Image (cartoon, rainbow, N blue to C red):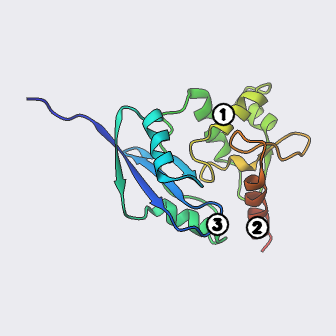
Amino acid sequence: MSTNNKKYIYVYSNIQKITDFRPIHLAVTEHGIAMLRYGITQDSFITILKDKFSDRQISINPDTHIVIKQIDEYLQESRKQFLYRLDLRNCSKFQRLVLNEVLHIPYGQTTTYQLIGQSIGNPHSSRAIGTALANNPLPIIVPCHRVIQTNGNIGGYLGSSHNNTKIYLLQLERHHSNV
């Protein structure tokens, strides 16, 4: 008699197209939020999950997860932080170190790749930090958009040189911080 020890990853989606951030897809494990993506189809999101979490059974949940509600509040400028456990176990040790440091950047403020490197004890790792942030599994929640280049340039966002989303998020936070 075999027992099913397969672990699940639960998918929550908010399909309504209100902003460029829609649809929003969230993957949650028993340990917390494991992945967030927006602007892609649910099928594309599931394909990504199958690649990243091949040991898990994917279950689509029709309900709206509390974190999607929190993201809506953030985009409507009524929330400055997210309250939910994060599951970063699928990240490398270095990436977890970087992402945990980025979580400490205050809302409406920025820091540099170099300063992140200094704070994690690796001051010459700006490129590696950029790579870790380009592969951030939880954009917006882990605010990699708050990390800019030392010369003041915005830099890329999620591995792309197209940084309109990063600029939008920074402006949203600056506007809300000044209110």
Q: Secondary structure at mark 3?
A: loop
Quarter of the picture holding the N terminus: top left
Density class for disc 1 (Cα within 10 Å; few <14, some 14-19, many ≥20) is many
Residue 19 shows which numbered tag? 3
Residue at the image position 40 percent from the left and 32 percent from the top: 54
Q: Upstream in the sequence, badge 3 or badge 2?
A: 3
**Gap between marks 3 and 2 measured at Cα:** 21 Å
Residue at the image position 56 percent from the left and 58 percent from the top: 82
Q: Are the residues tagged 3 and 1 within 8 Å (C-beta)? A: no
In this view, the residue in front, 59 or 100, is 59
Density class for disc 3 (Cα within 10 Å; few <14, some 14-19, many ≥20) is few
Residue 66 visible to the viewer: yes
Task: Provide the residue designation for mark 1.
Answer: 132
In the orientation shown, which residue stands out farthest toward the left? 1
Task: Provide the residue designation for mark 2.
Answer: 177
Quarter of the picture holding the C terminus: bottom right
